[in-house]
Amino acid sequence: GQYQGYHIQRWQRLIGEGPKGKTDRSAPLRVTSRMTNGAGYDEFLLPKKELVEKHQGIMKTYFTYLTKIREDLDAILKKIAVNNSVVVMTVNKGQSDLLMNFACSARARGFSLDNVLVFPTDIFSKDLAEGLGLATFYSHELMEHVPERDSKRYGDGTFGAIMLAKVICVHLVNDLGYDLLFQDVDISWYKNPFDFFHSAENSGFDMYFQDDGNRQQRFAPYSANSGFYFVRSNDRSKVLFRSMMYAGDLIFAARSHQQVLVQFLAEHNSLSGLRVKVLSRDDSEFPSGFHYNMRRDYMKQMVRGDKTPYIFHMCWTLNRDDKVAYMKQMGMWYLKDNCVGRKAASLGDINTACCSAEPIIECFYKDKASIIPCKDSPQKDKGSPSFW
């Protein structure tokens, strides 16, 4: 019996198992995964043997080098942390231009990047980040599982490998006792996000997440976006991210650490009292690709200057090409084209050679938000009216 149960069992009438499940009213009731949707499809993908063994190999390497990694990393963090806080990012070669654009745009808008720490997964990205004047921590042993290429689409194998890299860097910084803002490279700053997270009125939670906007079963109950969140280092958050570190096989199977993280947030909220706050998609301070694709009214307010968010996160895109196109239309792109894909050694002073003082604006699609009229551009989504 469940005399003090804290989980709700779900029962459904199904035939078939896992992704082959299907609702059938004539079938007997049975216990199902909490990620099983109304059609009977179970979105919780169990890891196969090869993924379990892949993760075991990464963990073996992790424990072999952990002491040295912690010592070297802490030495860097002590130098760059501001109010015991750092910005944590990770990047591979395939998305290095997005990192460059973030640095160029942030500096053009007057932000200091002194407490940004990049965890590059390859030498190409490491050299570019350091050429931009950003602090880096590179461990070939820990990151060799991550391909250099960009993911072709959301959720492919490369995407899944990068997801574990995101967990590694957050776990290591958090476990050393530093508060951190983790963010993806497809983000633009309009105001310093630390002003929000360090304010007295926002001191009551262990973790703050951007709302992903997606309400699929697999992201319930939080729909927390795993590409922009703030973490206070304490015993509760440390247990959470240690658990995430040990769940790499689940991340590989799901090809998304967001799906796994949301489930762990719910579990640790119940287990340890972890205080989690998701910043509602209906608020205007931390918009994302959800707003870009689904909230045209908000985007018009932003274009007119009626809304000035802290940041904008260009998620909800199929691939890197879409990100770049949308960011250029919105005046979020500051990286010169002649610097894309080139090694740091060939660029000289990267900030001077590659960063524009003004946004590089270009039209791609008439039906997507843009800060200038793009009425003569082709349509992106069939049946969608022009933004202007």
Image: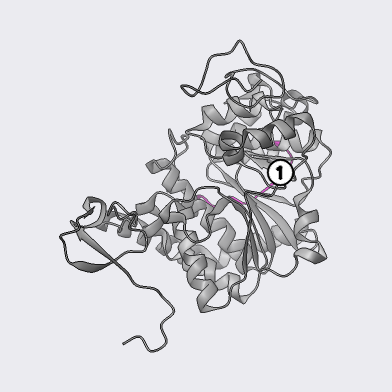
| Disc 1 secondary structure class | strand
Work out which residue is located at the far top of the displayed protein and give it. Answer: 376
139 drawn magenta: yes
Residue stretch in magenta: 131-140
314 drawn magenta: no
**Three-letter amino acid code at disc 1?**
Ile
Q: Nearer the viewer, residue 5 or 346?
A: 5
Residue at image coords 84%, 38%: 110
Point out residue 37 in the picture as x, y percentages from the top left corner. 34, 55
Compared with residue 10, is residue 80 higher up or lower down, i.e. above or below?
Answer: above
Work out which residue is located at the far front of the displayed protein and give it. Answer: 25
Residue at image coords 68%, 47%: 286
Report the magenta stretch's main SS.
loop
Q: Circle 1: is it few (<14), some (14-19), or many (20+) Cα within 10 Å? A: some
Position of the N terminus, as image quadrant, is bottom left
Horizontally, residue 55 falls left or right of residue 68, namely: left
Any part of residue 286 in sight: yes
Point out residue 291 in the picture as x, y percentages from the top left corner. 61, 39
Residue at image coords 56%, 63%: 171
Q: Quadrant of residue 299?
A: top right
Q: How is the image coloured?
A: one colour
Horizontally, residue 360 falls left or right of residue 21, namely: right
Residue at image coords 65%, 25%: 328
Compared with residue 344, is residue 9 higher up or lower down, i.e. above or below?
Answer: below
Compared with residue 122, is residue 268 higher up or lower down, i.e. above or below?
Answer: below
Q: Nearer the viewer, residue 12 or 263?
A: 12
Point out residue 180 in the picture as x, y percentages from the top left corner. 68, 59
Any part of residue 342 in sight: no
Compared with residue 227, is residue 377 higher up or lower down, i.e. above or below?
Answer: above
Position of the C terminus, as image quadrant, is top right
Q: In this figure, which residue is indicated by the disc labeled 1?
A: 311
Point out residue 355 in the picture as x, y percentages from the top left corner. 74, 27
